Image (spheres, rainbow, N blue to C red):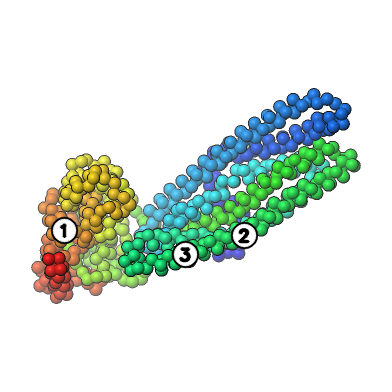
């Protein structure tokens, strides 16, 4: 919306659409809140009438000493009754409005997460994590802020209509004056919300920037400290925070200027109507009680009228925040699924035909053909940036090829229904992710696996010994990202997490790089010897790991240029032989450095 010419009308129109979207999510809560607001408005109008009646029938006769205050108890009872009615309305309005606001935020965040998880990895690669966190947190809060005062503002609208009607019935001239004054106040409110809208957009952008820098700083703390760049990172964060501060001060300062006018006008209106009312009393058109009723109504309206301004203020802020949330909802880079269901069975064969893939127009794979026999262990070897990790991502369908196809036992990966392919294919990355929960939950992900299945998976992954040494074994809390464990331990837990699911195809993208070479060899030997229903694809750098594979594919020049056993590739490909020789030299150097 910031790209269009903004007018007060566009802010009100788009704001009304946003409010209607929220109301449709929880109509019952909104109805209860509005009913409470209507009770509140009715109580105020009734109180004004009672005050006017008391003035004419109790106060003035007593002051004139023409009558004893025999109606005093009746007046007191009426005031108490109206007060109770008003209190019930306030409780209903606030309770329902609070529930509406928090329930809507919950639902929006759930929808937001579901939308994000339905998008392709290419969409995530274009986003800053800090920005996504800001959208899910501050932007959702800002976008739904208008729901807090909305039911009260709805009640105020009813109160305005009732007040103008009541004053017009008492005296048309007083009614005309009240309408003119209230319209002026509301127009200024609308103008203020329009002026501050683009300012709010800038504030939300600044919040996203601060969140991105903060997230980047926390994630890169080790790098920052190792290079001694704490001051640089702090100054960068300070600049972003100062810019956010300045933008926030600017928008609040602008709104405060409008609020000074808005708060003064109702008081001025009351004074003017009292002057007009006094003249109308002299003319015999109204009674003193009528003027008191009008003044009382307008005095009670002073804050509610300001609340309309608060709603419009929140509306402009909500639109600015919601624009960033809506951008996620509008993303259409969805993963397309078919109807194919996972099937149980043994190891699965894989076939890739004429596979092309590029990152942002940078071609990585071109015309790649691949055949993997079921039950074999295949090592993927290639120089840096040759496309090894990309091939692994394609085999697990975390990315889709630009052209060509990849099939699992004759079924195109893109033909599988949602959540079905992971039942047959497990992918383990080099940079493993562990959740802030127990070892057990990180392995099972709360699926109902037996203790025997957990023990088998951890044993094959070489994780049993270090798990037993943890304070509470499988029930040990790991902390965020598993920071209490070493890199090799985290990788072994991730491997156990994949193994326990007995995949038909297991893809290991350098998934044991952080463990000792001897431990890696033992793990790969165990995987080969175990009775697994799996075909295993492993990105390998260490010569000992490559030799364990049944077959090797050598990636070079964006395609597979050799496929066979390790010995065969040494004979037919000089580039492969040179690369393996470099790996062996590096392995000897590392052994020498450690001895």
Query: In this rendering, is residue 252 above or below 107?
Result: below
Q: Which mark is residue 253?
A: 2
311 left or right, relative to 286: left
Residue hosting label 1: 520
Q: Whole-percent x and y of residue 370? A: 21, 64
Crowd rating for badge 3 (residues with CA inside 10 Å; few <14, some 14–19, many 20+): some
Provide the secondary structure element on which disc 2 rests: helix
The residue singled out by tag 3 in the image is 238
Whether 582 is drawn above or below 46: the answer is below
**Marks 2/1: CA distance?**
62 Å
CA–CA distance between discs 1 and 3?
45 Å
Q: Position of residue 449 (x, y in %)?
A: 24, 42
Q: Position of residue 558 (x, y in %)?
A: 25, 71
Answer left or right for 343 relative to 317.
Answer: left
**Image point 49% across, 59% down: which residue?**
207
Residue 312 position within the rendered picture, expressed as x and y whole percent measured from the top left: 62, 52
Cα distance between the residues tagged 3 and 2: 22 Å
């Amino acid at each position: 919306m910031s790209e269009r010419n903004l007018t007060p009308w566009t802010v009100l129109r788009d704001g009304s659409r946003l409010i209607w979207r929220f109301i449709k999510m929880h109509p019952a809560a909104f109805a209860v809140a509005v009913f409470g607001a209507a009770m509140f408005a009715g109580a105020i109008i009734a109180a004004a009438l009672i005050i006017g009646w008391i003035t004419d029938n109790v106060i003035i006769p007593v002051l004139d000493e023409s009558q004893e205050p025999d109606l005093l108890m009746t007046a007191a009872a009426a005031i108490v009754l109206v007060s109770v009615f008003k209190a019930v309305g306030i409780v209903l309005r606030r309770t329902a409005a609070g529930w509406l606001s928090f329930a809507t935020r919950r639902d929006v965040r759930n929808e937001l997460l579901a939308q994000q998880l339905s998008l392709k990895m290419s969409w995530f690669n274009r986003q800053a994590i800090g920005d996504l966190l800001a959208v899910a947190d501050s932007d959702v809060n800002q976008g739904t802020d208008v729901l807090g005062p909305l039911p009260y503002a709805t009640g105020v609208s009813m109160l305005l209509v009732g007040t103008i009607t009541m004053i017009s019935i008492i005296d048309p001239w007083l009614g005309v004056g009240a309408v003119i004054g209230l319209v002026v106040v509301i127009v200024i409110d609308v103008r203020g919300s329009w002026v501050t809208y683009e300012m709010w957009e800038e504030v939300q952008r600044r919040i996203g920037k601060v969140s991105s820098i903060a997230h980047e700083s926390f994630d890169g703390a080790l790098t920052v400290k190792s290079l001694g760049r704490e001051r640089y990172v702090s100054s960068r964060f300070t600049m972003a925070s100062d810019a956010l501060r300045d933008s926030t001060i600017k928008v609040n300062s602008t709104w405060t200027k409008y609020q000074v006018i808005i708060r003064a006008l109702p008081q001025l209106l009351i004074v003017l109507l009292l002057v007009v009312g006094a003249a109308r009393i002299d003319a015999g058109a109204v009674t003193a009680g009528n003027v008191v009723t009008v003044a009382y109504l307008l005095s009670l309206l002073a804050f509610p009228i300001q609340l309309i301004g608060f709603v419009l203020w929140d509306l402009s802020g909500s639109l600015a925040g919601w624009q960033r949330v809506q951008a996620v909802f509008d993303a259409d880079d969805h993963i397309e699924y078919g109807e194919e269901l996972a099937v149980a069975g043994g190891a699965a064969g894989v076939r890739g035909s004429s596979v092309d893939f590029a990152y942002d127009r940078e071609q990585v794979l071109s015309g790649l053909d691949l055949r993997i026999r079921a039950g074999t262990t295949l090592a993927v070897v290639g120089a840096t940036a040759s496309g090894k990790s990309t091939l692994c991502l394609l085999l697990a369908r975390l990315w889709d090829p630009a052209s060509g196809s990849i099939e699992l036992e004759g079924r195109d990966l893109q033909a599988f229904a949602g959540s079905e392919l992971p039942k047959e294919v497990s992918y383990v990355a080099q940079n493993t992710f562990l959740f802030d929960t127990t070892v057990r939950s990180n392995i099972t992900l709360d699926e109902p696996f037996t203790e025997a299945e957990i023990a088998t998976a951890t044993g094959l992954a070489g994780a049993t010994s270090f798990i037993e040494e943890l304070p509470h074994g499988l029930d040990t809390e790991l902390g965020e990202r598993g920071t209490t464990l070493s890199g090799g331990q985290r990788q072994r837990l991730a491997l156990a997490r994949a193994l326990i699911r007995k995949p038909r195809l297991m893809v290991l993208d350098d998934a044991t790089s952080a463990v000792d070479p001897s431990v890696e060899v033992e793990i790969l030997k165990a995987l080969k010897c175990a009775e697994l229903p799996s075909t295993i694809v492993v990105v390998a750098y260490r010569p000992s790991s490559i030799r364990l594979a049944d077959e090797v594919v050598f990636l070079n020049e964006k395609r597979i240029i050799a496929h066979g056993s390790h010995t065969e590739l040494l004979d037919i490909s000089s580039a492969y032989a040179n690369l393996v020789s470099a790996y062996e030299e590096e392995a000897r150097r590392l052994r020498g450095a450690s001895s």
